[in-house]
């Protein structure tokens, strides 16, 4: 590329293009002279040829990429901007004091190190003899009067801080950034670093802290449910991150505001993330504040991140279950007994046996509930050895159950039998809900000559459904000693998206061990498939203990969604239950008219009250084809307690209130490694350099040696200017008119 200029007019073009321009201009001039000499009207012809030459000259000039450049020399002193981070992460105590710096302590907080550097005014040599002007600015410091919400939302926006320095700088020569590089707000600092590079201003980063995490145990999250059933266990999952170089045997403990406690012995591996859970029995109605904590281990440098508080609301339960069966087999009888004797459960049974007639008694109904307002009252439907066909369920009834599960957040339990009626369910929409692939070649099932046992999968070991003991260790022993089974429904494998809780310990196929207990989700509801019909044998030696407990837990697990926020006219479901700031909460609601039928003609609104007291009204969208179902979503903009008042505008009394607790995880955290890679990238892009506090003298010398800031150059690309095509068209028009007047045509 060749560059040349004529005063403020600058050109750039490749050699071959310059040669081509010269040839074209020479040829145009030569032909013009020849045409003028041969013409009988040389003056007119000469004028036209001159106009032609002017057109060609204009095009050739534009091909050479002309730019009009003006240079503006600054009369301001060169400026050096110094910016430092004062965010919460700077409180991490992992910064090493340089030997040249006064003080007895060797390790300081990042904030203290930066403060000492700033107080030392290391930049004074920059200002000597008026060579430079220094500006200083800090950012990220939380307000002294900030509440818990403001503290949680405060963070580090390096891009904005440096962008302000660049925008406000006058004749900027260099920028120095002091911090740990831990940005968590705004866009990546790469963007502002590129802007500095375009301006010819390098960023020198002075790294503070350590890019390896300090020795620590941190309780990073607690994913407790928002409510629990009074008298029942709630599972409290938690996560602990360890940066200790050794295994730690410790004890995790939960304590309520009433003084009740539960604990669990755990072992946390070195430099790992530990996922676990603890059971907590909900004892009272209403909200209870709980604290989960672990003691400070030897060698920990941060002690304020070993505990978290959360709230669980206790609720009395009222679960309605519909059991549909064709034959009063042993499993049916004991499930009926288990649910009938459960004080929190109301059970209705429908026995569809052509020879025995309909079941009679206080727990029996004579007909399938055909009205939606009657069917939607059931939280769980248990389908035994029953299918679709004459004397069984109709296709319409099966489809109604499918709608109950998907649209009304109910649960369905499949317990097939030896008659193989479950294969006919594929003729209805219920077939899609079955979470396993049935073996069409073995419709009679798999019989065992000896007692066969099942074993829990890793998912089953953590599930509340299969928690038959008071602790995980006790639960493992119970399942290992449970009586086995002699028959299993024919299953090929579990469908994608389902969860296997228990497997056949003896039988395998190409997909692995045959699944026994499988769960899945369907719409807003839940599904459970039980491949054996002999769980009643778990009563051996312990009577009803484990069998009753298992089916009671199934009923409660399946009805959980419906009971999260349930009123007489409205049910509200939301996910996730404990969102974090920035998360979107998905809302699903069911509304009913005064007769109990799904509300199909009407609207549903929610008043959202944020933790800061601001109220926003939103309208939920009606879902077409669903049973009075509405949906919507909103963004959690701040941590704390969000109140949701859901109501039917025409009937304000038909309202329900729910609370969503947004975890107050702070954006800024101490104990995290300094992000040297961010600082290095900033410096590299802007053509600066990253140094540590020990090399600050080198940094000062290097900046003093920088050349003076370049003058401001303004460039106008003439070839791309909007006037260029107008001038060319005008010249060509004049040439064409001239030829017409000269009689060329």
Image (cartoon, rainbow, N blue to C red):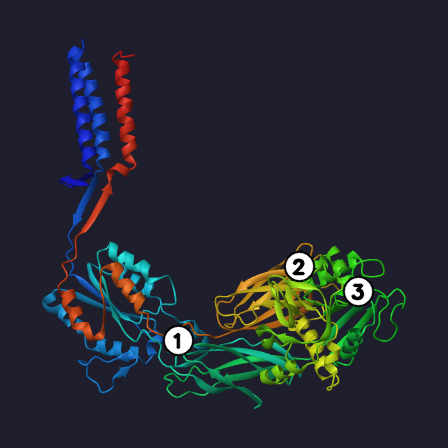
Per the model, the C-alpha gap separating discs 2 and 3 is 46 Å
Q: Assess whether mark 3 and mark 2 are in contact (beta carbons under 8 angstroms).
A: no
198 lies above or below 235? above
Could you tell me which residue is drawn at 81 percent across and 58 percent down? 389
Which circle's residue, 3 or 1, is located before the other in the chain? 3
Q: Indicate which disc, 1 or 2, sits on the residue closer to the N terminus.
A: 2
C-alpha span from label 3 to label 1: 60 Å
Q: Is mark 3 on a helix, strand or loop?
A: loop
Up the image or down, 99 lies above or below 738; here it is: below
Taking the image as drawn, is residue 649 in sight? no
Left or right relative to 315: residue 242 = left
Q: Residue 603 carries which label?
A: 2
**Which residue is outermost to the bottom?**
259
Residue 251 visible to an observer of this rendering: yes
Front: mark 3 or 1: 3
Q: How crowded is mark 3: few (under 14 residues within 10 Å), some or many (20 or more)?
A: some
Report helix, strand or loop for mark 1: loop
Q: Is residue 501 left or right of residue 377?
A: left
Q: Nearer the viewer, residue 293 or 122?
A: 293
Which of discs 2 and 3 lies nearer the camera? The answer is 3
State the residue at coordinates (52%, 70%).
579
**Discs 1, 2 touching: Cβ within 8 Å:** no
The residue drawn where x is 64% and y is 60% is: 630
Q: Which residue position is annotated with label 1?
A: 669
Circle number at residue 701: none
Q: In front here: 723 or 419? A: 419
Please rate how many residues cluster around mark 1, counting C-alpha atoms within 10 Å: few if below 14, some from 14 to 19, many from 20.
some
Q: In which quarter of the image is the C terminus?
A: top left
* Residue designated by label 3: 419
């Amino acid at each position: 590329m060749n560059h040349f200029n004529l005063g403020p007019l600058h050109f750039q073009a490749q050699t071959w293009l310059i040669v081509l321009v010269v040839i074209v201009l020479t040829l145009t001039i030569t032909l013009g002279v020849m045409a003028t000499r041969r013409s009988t009207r040389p003056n007119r012809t000469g004028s036209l040829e001159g106009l032609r030459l002017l057109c060609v000259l204009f095009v050739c000039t534009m091909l050479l990429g002309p730019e009009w450049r003006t240079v503006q020399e600054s009369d301001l002193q060169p400026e050096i901007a110094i910016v430092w981070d004062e965010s919460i992460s700077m409180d991490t105590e992992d910064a090493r004091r340089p030997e040249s710096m006064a003080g007895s302590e060797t390790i300081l907080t990042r904030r203290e190190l930066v403060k000492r550097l700033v107080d030392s005014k290391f930049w004074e040599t920059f200002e000597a003899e008026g060579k430079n002007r220094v500006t200083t600015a800090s950012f990220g410091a939380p307000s002294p009067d900030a509440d818990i919400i403001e503290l949680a939302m405060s963070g580090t926006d390096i891009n904005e801080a440096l962008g302000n320095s660049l925008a406000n700088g006058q004749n900027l020569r260099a920028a120095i950034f002091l911090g740990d590089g831990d940005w968590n707000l705004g866009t990546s600092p790469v963007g502002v670093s590129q802007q500095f590079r375009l301006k010819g201003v390098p960023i020198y980063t002075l790294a503070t802290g350590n890019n390896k995490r300090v020795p620590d145990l941190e309780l990073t999250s607690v994913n407790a449910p928002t409510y629990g059933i009074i008298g029942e266990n709630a599972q409290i999952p938690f996560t602990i991150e360890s940066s200790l170089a050794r295994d730690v045997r410790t004890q995790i403990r939960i304590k309520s505001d009433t003084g009740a406690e539960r604990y669990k012995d755990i072992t946390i591996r070195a430099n790992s993330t530990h996922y676990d859970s603890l059971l907590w029995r909900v004892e009272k109605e209403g909200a209870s504040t709980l604290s989960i904590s672990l003691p400070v281990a030897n060698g920990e440098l941060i002690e304020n991140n070993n505990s978290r508080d959360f709230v669980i609301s206790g609720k009395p339960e009222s679960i309605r279950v519909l059991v549909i069966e064709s034959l009063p087999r042993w499993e049916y009888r004991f499930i009926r007994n288990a649910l009938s004797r459960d004080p929190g459960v109301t059970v209705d049974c429908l026995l569809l046996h052509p020879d025995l007639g309909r079941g009679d008694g206080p727990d029996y109904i004579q007909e399938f509930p055909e009205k939606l307002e009657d069917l939607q009252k059931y939280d769980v439907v248990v389908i035994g050895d029953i299918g679709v066909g004459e004397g069984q369920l109709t296709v319409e009834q099966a489809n109604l159950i499918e709608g109950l599960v998907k649209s009304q957040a109910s649960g369905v339990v499949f317990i097939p039998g030896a008659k193989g009626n479950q294969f006919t369910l594929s003729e209805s929409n219920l077939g899609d809900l079955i979470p396993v692939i049935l073996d069409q070649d073995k419709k009679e099932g798999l019989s065992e000559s000896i007692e066969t046992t099942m074993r829990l999968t890793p998912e089953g070991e953590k599930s509340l459904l299969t928690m038959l003991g008071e602790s995980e260790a006790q639960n493992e022993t119970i399942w290992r000693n449970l009586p086995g089974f002699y028959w299993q429904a024919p299953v090929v494998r579990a469908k994608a998206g389902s969860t296997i809780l228990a497997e056949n310990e003896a039988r395998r196929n190409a997909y692995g061990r045959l699944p026994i207990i499988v769960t899945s989700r369907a719409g807003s509801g839940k599904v459970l498939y039980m491949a054996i019909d002999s769980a009643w044998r778990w009563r051996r030696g312990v009577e009803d203990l484990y069998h009753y407990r298992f089916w009671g837990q199934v009923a409660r697990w399946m009805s959980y969604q419906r009971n999260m926020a349930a009123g007489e006219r409205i049910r509200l479901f939301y996910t996730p239950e404990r969102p974090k700031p920035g998360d979107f909460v998905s809302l699903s609601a069911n509304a009913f008219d005064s007769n109990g039928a799904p509300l199909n003609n009407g609207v549903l609104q929610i008043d959202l009250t944020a933790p800061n007291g601001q109220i926003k009204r939103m309208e939920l969208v009606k879902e077409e084809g669903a049973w009075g179902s509405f949906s919507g979503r909103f963004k959690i903009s701040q941590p704390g307690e969000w109140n949701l008042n859901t109501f039917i505008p025409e009937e304000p009394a038909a309202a329900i209130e729910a609370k969503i607790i947004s975890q107050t995880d702070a954006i800024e955290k101490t104990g995290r490694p300094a992000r040297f890679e961010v600082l290095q990238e900033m410096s590299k892009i802007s053509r600066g350099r990253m140094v540590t506090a020990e090399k600050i003298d080198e940094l000062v010398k290097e900046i003093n040696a920088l050349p003076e800031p370049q003058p401001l150059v303004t460039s106008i690309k003439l070839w791309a200017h909007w006037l260029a095509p107008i001038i060319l068209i005008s010249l060509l028009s004049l040439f064409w008119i001239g030829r017409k007047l000269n009689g060329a045509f």
